[in-house]
Image (cartoon, rainbow, N blue to C red):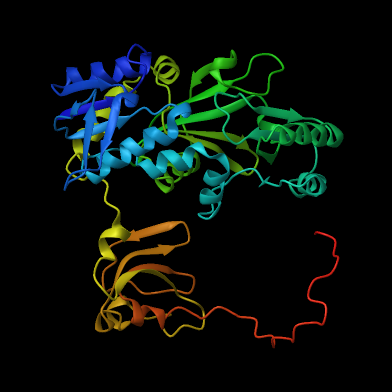
C-alpha cells in the first residue's frame, strides 16, 4: 500500500519507527507535514493540495496530529475521509479525544468506569461540585492540557477553590475529578490497535509526584493486563472512534478507571518498556483494514427521502420483549436492525433468531414514519399560557 504519515516531527522516535516498520514490510511511505496541506473545495470531487501542488493518490493515512494544530489537522483528515482514503483514527475521534470534557461525556454514556467528574463555571457552584465528587483532595484538570501539564492535586477544599477561581479568572476551563488515593503516582498505559491491546505498561511517578507521565520523570515497566482492563481500554478507544490509541487507566479498588484516550500516543516509552514492535502492529492493522475507509454512515443512509437512522429502545412494557427479530414485525415495516446493544455487549448485524429483552437498544435503518411510532413520546409540560402581566418588564435579580 501507499501510506502517508501526517506529522510535523519527522525525526521524532514515533514517526521514524512507523516509517521504518512500513518500509520493512514493503510499503511505500512518506511523512507529510500536516500544515503544508491545502484543502481544495473548488472542483467536482474533494481534493487536497500539498506544497501548492495536487496531492498524489494514497491508500491510507496515519495521522499524528499535535495538540496545537487540532483544528486544521482534523480538517485535513476529514478531507482524506471525503476522498475515501482509509485512516485508523477518524477526524471526529481525534477532535473528541482532545477535549477532556467532551471525551468524558461520550465515555460516560457507555458505562465506562471513570473517576467521578464535574464541570462548572460559576464561583458559587465550585464547592458543591467538589462535594459531589467526594470532597478534597481533588484533581483539577485543564481541558486542553497534555503530558501532565495543567493537572493539579488540591489537598484541601480551600486550596481547590482558590486554584479553580484563579484558573477561571484567566479564562481557563477546568474539570474537577475525584482523587483515586489507592493509585497515587501510578497508572496503566494500554496501547490499543484495532480490537486488541498490543502492549501495556505501568507508569510510576518519581518521588512525591502524583503524575506518572514519563515526561515528568516517571519510570515504566511492562505489565500483563487483566481482562477487565483490556476490555475497558479497547471499548474506550472504539467508542471514541480511534483504532490506534493510548488509553490511560488508574488501578482503583473498583476496577479500571479510564483517565484519558490519546489519539497520537508516543511509542518510545512503551516499546522500550515492553520490547514489542508496536509500530509494526499499527502498520499491519492499517494494511489489513485499508480496503475499509471511514464512512459517515448516518450521512450515507439518510440521503433517501423518508429513510433514516434511529435508536429504538425495548422497554419492559414493549410488545417486542420475548420476540425474536424475525417475529418482531420490523422487516414488514421496512426497518432493519443494524446492531443490537445489550448492556455493554454489542451484537453486530443481529439475525432473525435473536430474542429481544427488556433494556435492549437497537440501532435501526428504515422508514422514519414507522420508526417514529416505535419511539415513546417525551413527556411534555402542557401548562396553560398565561396572559401578559400589566408590567411585562420589571426589576429582577439574575439567577
Where the N terminus falls, by quadrant? top left
Residue 119, image x, y percentages: 67, 46
Which one is nearer the viewer's eye here, 373 or 214?
Answer: 373
Which one is nearer the viewer's eye here, 124 or 132?
Answer: 124
Residue 307: quadrant of the picture: bottom left
Q: Residue at x 41, y 42 (%)?
A: 93
Vertical arrangement, residue 119 with respect to residue 146, above or below: below
Q: Residue at x 71, y 47 (%)?
A: 120
Residue 266, image x, y percentages: 42, 22
Q: Would residue 71 appear left or right of 176 to someone viewing this image?
A: left
Residue 118, image x, y percentages: 68, 47
Q: Residue at x 32, y 15 (%)?
A: 10
Q: Would residue 150 appear left or right of 341 to someone viewing this image?
A: right
Whether residue 218 appears in this view of the structure is no
Q: Would residue 381 appear left or right of 378 to someone viewing this image?
A: right
Residue 42, image x, y percentages: 22, 43
Whether residue 380 appears in this view of the structure is yes
Residue 58: quadrant of the picture: top left
Where the C terminus falls, by quadrant? bottom right
Callout count: 0
Vertical arrangement, residue 296 with respect to residue 12, above or below: below
Amino acid at each position: 500500500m501507499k501510506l502517508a504519515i501526517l506529522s510535523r516531527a519527522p525525526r521524532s522516535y514515533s514517526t521514524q519507527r512507523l516509517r521504518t516498520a512500513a518500509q520493512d514490510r514493503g510499503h511505500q511511505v512518506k511523512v507529510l507535514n500536516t500544515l503544508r496541506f491545502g484543502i481544495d473545495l473548488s472542483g467536482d470531487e474533494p481534493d487536497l493540495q500539498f506544497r501548492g501542488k495536487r496531492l498524489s493518490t494514497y491508500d491510507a493515512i496515519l495521522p499524528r496530529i499535535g495538540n496545537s494544530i487540532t483544528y486544521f489537522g482534523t480538517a485535513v483528515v476529514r478531507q482524506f475521509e471525503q476522498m475515501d482514503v482509509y485512516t485508523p483514527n477518524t477526524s471526529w475521534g481525534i477532535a473528541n479525544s482532545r477535549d477532556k470534557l467532551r471525551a468524558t461525556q461520550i465515555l460516560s454514556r457507555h458505562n465506562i468506569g471513570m473517576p467521578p467528574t464535574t464541570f462548572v463555571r460559576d464561583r458559587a457552584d465550585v464547592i458543591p461540585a467538589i462535594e459531589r465528587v467526594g470532597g478534597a483532595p481533588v484533581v483539577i484538570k485543564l481541558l486542553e492540557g497534555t503530558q501532565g501539564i495543567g493537572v493539579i492535586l488540591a489537598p484541601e477544599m480551600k486550596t481547590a477553590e482558590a486554584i479553580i477561581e484563579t484558573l477561571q479568572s484567566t479564562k481557563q476551563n477546568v474539570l474537577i475529578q475525584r482523587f483515586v488515593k489507592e493509585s497515587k503516582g501510578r497508572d496503566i498505559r494500554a496501547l490499543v490497535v484495532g480490537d486488541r491491546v498490543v502492549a501495556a505498561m505501568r507508569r510510576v511517578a518519581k518521588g512525591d509526584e502524583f503524575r506518572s507521565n514519563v515526561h515528568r520523570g516517571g519510570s515504566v515497566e511492562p505489565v500483563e493486563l487483566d481482562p477487565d482492563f483490556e476490555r475497558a481500554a479497547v471499548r474506550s478507544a472504539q467508542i471514541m472512534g480511534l483504532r490506534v490509541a493510548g488509553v490511560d487507566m488508574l488501578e482503583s479498588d473498583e476496577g479500571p478507571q479510564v483517565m484519558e484516550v490519546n489519539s497520537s500516543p508516543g511509542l518510545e516509552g512503551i516499546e522500550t518498556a515492553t520490547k514489542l514492535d508496536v509500530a509494526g502492529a499499527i502498520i499491519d492493522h492499517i494494511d489489513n483494514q485499508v480496503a475499509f475507509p471511514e464512512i459517515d454512515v448516518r450521512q450515507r443512509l439518510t440521503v433517501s427521502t423518508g429513510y433514516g437512522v434511529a435508536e429504538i429502545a425495548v422497554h419492559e412494557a414493549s410488545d417486542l420483549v420475548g420476540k425474536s427479530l424475525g417475529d418482531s414485525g420490523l422487516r414488514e415495516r421496512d426497518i432493519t436492525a443494524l446492531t443490537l446493544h445489550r448492556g455493554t455487549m454489542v451484537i453486530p448485524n443481529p439475525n432473525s433468531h435473536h430474542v429481544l429483552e427488556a433494556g435492549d437498544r437497537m440501532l435501526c435503518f428504515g422508514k422514519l414514519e414507522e420508526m417514529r411510532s416505535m419511539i415513546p413520546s417525551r413527556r411534555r409540560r402542557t401548562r396553560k399560557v398565561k396572559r401578559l402581566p400589566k408590567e411585562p418588564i420589571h426589576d429582577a435579580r439574575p439567577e
